[in-house]
Amino acid sequence: MAKVVITDSDFEEQDIERHMIAEAGMELAIFHNRDADAIIENAADADGIITSYGDFPRKVFKALPRLKVVSRTGVGYDSIDLQAATDYGVAVCTHPGYGTEVVSDHAITLAMDVLRRTNELDADMRAGIWNHHARRPLGQAYGRTFGVVGMGEIGRAVARKAAGLGFKVICTSRSLKPGRRTPEGYDIYELDVLLSMVDVVSFHCALTPQTHHLLDEKRLRMMKPGAVVVNTSRGPIIDTVALARALEAGKLWGAGLDVFESEPLDRSHPILLAPHTVLTPHAAYWSEESGEELRTRTTRAVIDILSGRKPMDCLNPEVLE
């Protein structure tokens, strides 16, 4: 009987996973430790692993000779050594597209909340203050330029929704050539040019060595004083300390952040004291519908591989040959 181990989970219960794995005639064990050494101990006899935030350096794959698949409840895989997994013949599955609509909803919500000062007006109301003039300026979508950094599925959904609200949308992406337009009609620019033009910039790119601190102190200085920064992708794409300094100095309209360089966010981090921010706890991906889809797809990938079938999504399909 094949054995599946959940090393750690972002979800309170595992009823979906239990039902699917039992129905497939497989054994399930559940743990709550994402540390690499704990994974080696807890998954010593695992054929498949389901993880949310587990740490999978090379030593994990070396220590687990039975392992055939690691399936992560998410899109990113920066905590998984993909080359090591491939070297040891382990398939790595992530699940792009499951959260396209809800993450893009969240990015647009953050942008509009910052422009409209929604959280600040709400706080005033609860404090008995009825005076919107105290929170001016208040912004609108129409007449502003919205820049999308990274035009994958989520980036394109954000662009579509921003355009629908009345923003002029421009974009930049590794796979797109500046000076041209996308099929949807969005002008493509180099990143530095885009940053100098936008009133809102929303980040939707993967975390790589090249995108670490993609928005740093130097690039923050390129932006308009009335610009809004939104990040729902990966925290380290933005130098959050530099962003906090820019906000404190009044060099930006505001920022809406769902992801941070270290999570949970340290209570002493300066971004918590920076003005004109809307902060959410890495929640952009979550809706009841998207959560169920993600868990089902994550579990299905493990079952498929252990049953000799090709999964819907696999980062290194060559190991399945």
Image: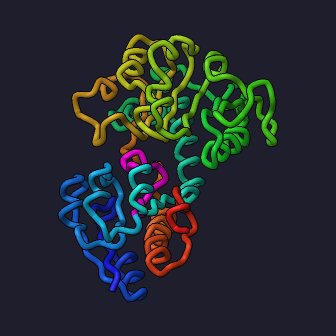
Residue positioned 35% across, 61% down in the render: 51
Residue positioned 56% across, 39% down in the render: 204
Q: Which secondary structure class fits the magenta region best?
A: loop
Rendered view: 198 above or below 92: above
Say how the picture is coloured: rainbow
Q: Nearer the viewer, residue 96 or 91?
A: 91
- Extent of the magenta region: 70-81
> Would you say residue 197 sits in the magenta stretch?
no
x, y percent for residue 183: 81, 42
Image quadrant where one finds the N terminus:
bottom left
Quarter-wise, where is residue 162 in the image?
top right
Rendered view: 82 above or below 15: above
Q: Nearer the viewer, residue 28 or 220?
A: 28
x, y percent for residue 71: 42, 63
Relative horizontal placement of residue 29, taking residue 137 as reference (left or right) = left
Residue positioned 36% across, 57% down in the render: 52
Q: How many marks?
A: 0
x, y percent for residue 45: 25, 73
x, y percent for residue 139: 60, 26
Relative horizontal placement of residue 296, taking residue 226 as reference (left or right) = left
Quarter-wise, where is residue 86 in the image?
bottom left
Relative horizontal placement of residue 303, taking residue 64 as reference (left or right) = right
Q: Nearer the viewer, residue 177 or 219?
A: 177
> Would you say residue 72 sits in the magenta stretch?
yes
Image quadrant where one finds the C terminus:
bottom right
